[in-house]
Amino acid sequence: MDRPHTLADTMPIELKLSQLTAFHPSDPAAGRPEICAELDRYDIAVVLKATYEWGGYSYTNASDAIAAAKRAPK
């Protein structure tokens, strides 16, 4: 039996913004330091979710992206 693609797994990854800034301190997507501090203060987690892109569209569900690709003319 084939294992599911690792990016198709539905288990979310939760991180604190301070963890992101530790790895990418210059990344503006991690947020301003005061925002990160507030999120950490209130124990707000960052949840990373996979996005699947095909044919110029973005999908949050792998099955939807696959179904769209299957419907496309070959």
Image (cartoon, rainbow, N blue to C red):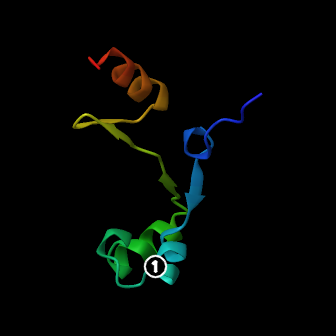
Where does residue 63 sit, x and y in percent of width and height? 48, 25
* Left or right of 47, for residue 56: left
- Identify the residue at horizontal 35%, vertical 24% (top origin): 69
Which of the pair 11/1 is nearer the observer?
1
Q: In the displayed image of the protein, which residue is found farthest to the right?
A: 1
- In the rendered image of this protein, does residue 8 appear above or below residue 22? above
Image point (37%, 81%), residue name: 33
Up the image or down, 67 lies above or below 36; here it is above
Residue at 47% across, 47% down = 49
Residue 66, picture quadrant = top left
Residue that lies at the very extreme toward the left in this rendered image: 56
Residue 36 at x, y = what percent?
42, 73
Q: Is residue 42 left or right of residue 32?
A: right
Quick one: 35 or 70, which is closer to the camera?
Answer: 70
Position of 45 with respect to 2 (left or right) is left
Residue at 54% over, 67% down: 16
Q: Position of residue 59 (x, y in %)?
A: 36, 34
- Which residue is label 1 attached to? 21
Question: How many other residues sit within 10 Å of disc 1, few (<14), some (14-19) or many (≥20)?
Answer: some
Q: SS at mark 1? A: helix
